[in-house]
Image (cartoon, grey):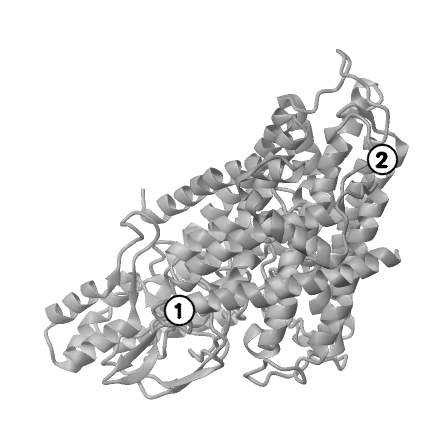
Amino acid sequence: MKKYIIQSIRLTLVLIVLLCIIYPISIALAGKLSKGNGGGEKIAKNGKIVGYELLGQSFTKPEYFWGRPSAVAYNAAGSAGSNKGPSNPDYLKEVQSRIDTLLKYNPGLKKSDIPADMVTASGSGLDPNISEQGAAIQIARVAKTRKISEQKVKDLVAMNTLKPLMGLFGPSSVNVLKLNLALDKL
Amino acid sequence: MNTELIGIIATFLLTLVIAIPLGKYLAKVFAGEKVWTDFLKPLETGIYKLSGINIKEQMDWKQQLKALLTINVLWLVYGFFVLIFQDKLPFNPDGNPGMTPDLAFNTIISFVANCNLQHYSGESGVSYLTQQFVLMFLQFVSAATGIAAAVVLFKAFRDKTTTQLGNFWEFFVRAITRLLLPLSIVIALILTFNGTPASYDGKDKFISLQGDTVNVSRGPAAQLIAIKHLGTNGGGYFGANSAHPFENPSYFTNMVEVIAQVIIPMAMIIAFGYFIRRRKLGWTIFGVMTVGLFMLMIPTLSSELGGNPALAKMGISQATGAMEGKEVRFGPAATAYWSTVTTVISTGSVNGMHDSTMPLTGLWQLLAMMINAVYGGCGVGLLNYFIYLIIAVFISGLMVGRTPEFLGHKVEAREIKIAAIITLLSPFLILAGTAIASYVFTNYGDASWAVQPKNWLNNPGFHGFSEMLYEVTSSNANNGSGFEGLGDNNIFWNVLTGVIIFLGRFLPIIGPVAIAGLLGAKKFIPESAGTLKTDTKTFALMTFAVILVLNALSYFPALALGPLAEYFTMLK
């Protein structure tokens, strides 16, 4: 028994050096070569950092495309989903009010055109994307508020749409922050 | 066919393409045969030398378990104190506080046990030191513990009669040097170059496009996320686990992570067949498990892709499926696929919130964790399945009126008793645990704990019951995922689930290893016409029936009160 205890202590110490020092530091060093230097890829506007490519942000002004509802209000100090169950009455009321808000700010929008992602909270609360349909239903509003042609906005959406992986796997998506930055650049 | 479905089919096929050769490789590694990674031998020799280990020393099953338990207890003590004092230790750039004793108790058991149930949030609950020197460390060694325990079982059935089951330390170290560490390096690099943070920078701050000030939690995440999947651990770096865009930046990384978590459990089954030179048995077990996977996955997909009926009534479009708690870049199909995979094996990482999935999805998730042997966790999946096998052998033996045998060894009263205790342990822990929780919730709602029992549940009615049932089931299965709406960081849940995780981890390791050791030491009886063959389709079906009947009988009432009741209420 005593032998096992001593062996355990020594083995643990050796493995801590290997697994908790050598391994992670090597990866961190290699990460310096990646696009965001291993600290997450940032996006700048006029030389100032305005966000991270992967992290969604809160957009409420009508001239911007809106992202998905978030359970953490897009505060990336934390992350969480709503954890609301599918039959929870309070939750269903919340969804209904999101539908109403969308209908109010997007005149002419049909309820049946609203995609689920625009009225449901994401898993992380930081989802940077919306679906293509989620962008499509906002084009008229954004164009009108910014007083530019709908076609121009549509083109921007198309340019900022990420197609399925290799054109084959998974859904397509629109990065809201990048799209809004492109709008501001017009 | 749409791209979301093609995506998950491709994911599954890629998993097989990687897991099968990996299984053959593992069989050779643990048999000490020549493999291409033998250039790592000097590293292993160095580790043995520094640790004072002589790998030539053979151990019997009792010595194996002694070594296993000794080192696990050591980790419990070491980790507990780091968690409590993390605020006073270095390497805490965000200034996070130390853990309360009950939270530290829960967290350390959870990570030593390969469960990774988390009652804290990574961003605010732990320091960088804790993340790497305790949590990530344990993700490596707890997976290696499971694998080494399974290899002991391999050893018991390779030779005709033996008590010499090899050296535990050797299996344990090799699981790290030949498998977990090299693959972790590859996956961590893939993640880093696809956007996951890997540096030691602290929190960042920026002003968003609309003018809000936003804080961003970061840190060395890629390193941990790699092993969290490979080792079927599942504990996330960030609170939202692999739904967080930093933990899982794209559809591509999602494929990598969901493949990474199944390859070792699958490979271990194949390795078993090759190692004991009964490939057909290995493939038969693999077949039963794969059928089980599809039987859980197909209905899950159907219930998620169908969307939430309550939202459908509101008149919106759910073209791709239910989206609450899911991320757009993965979509409902890949999230449903992940939810099945992460519950059949014991990872418990999530890329979407299980609490918000449809009632029937919750049912399949729960059932997957109750069975806990469809591939199962790193190494321990096979151990769990072995118990079902022994029960199936016993019942078949009774049916044909012969002394039951398994691989040439008589299965007698002692082995059956152990198997029966282990089989009964899960329903006991799950049902008693849920019952106690429900009792406290209804009778002691005002108890002055960090979260008062009346505020535990995030959802009313049947779904609330499911939240408690899920928490306990996940603990017993050492899964670690949760219906995260549950207010679980308080002394009741920390202690209850801590105890359940501990029992649910170590007894199901001790039991099968003991049975294997006892059987391996018995006289070998050559096969004859009267031998019950365990690698036939008939016996596969028998095992499948045993798994189904045992679990249905144990859990149907509880499942009826939770997800089934919610499902039928929603139909109204």
**Do badges 2 and 1 share one subunit?**
no
Q: Residue furthest top?
A: B529
Say which residue label 1 marks: A127
Toward the viewer: B520 or B428? B520
Left or right of B474 in this view: B261? left
Inspect this view and state whether residue B425 appears: yes
Amino acid type shown at disc 1? Asp
Q: Chain ID for label 1?
A: A
Left or right of B406 in this view: B230? left
Q: Are marks 2 and 1 in contact (CB under 8 Å)?
A: no
Say which residue label 2 marks: B518
Inspect this view and state whether residue B306 appears: no
Quarter occupied by residue A183: bottom left
Toward the viewer: B557 or B374? B374
Amino acid type shown at disc 2? Leu
Instruction: Please identify, in this view, whether the residue under mark 2 or under mark 1 is nearer the observer.
Output: 2
Other-residue count near label 2 (Cα within 10 Å), few / some / many at <14 / 14–19 / ≥20: many
Q: Residue at x 53, y 52 (%)?
A: B182
- Quick check: A115 above or below B96? above
Q: Quadrant of the N terminus of chain B?
A: top left
**How many numbered circles does the render carry?**
2
Q: Position of residue B97 (x, y in %)?
A: 64, 84
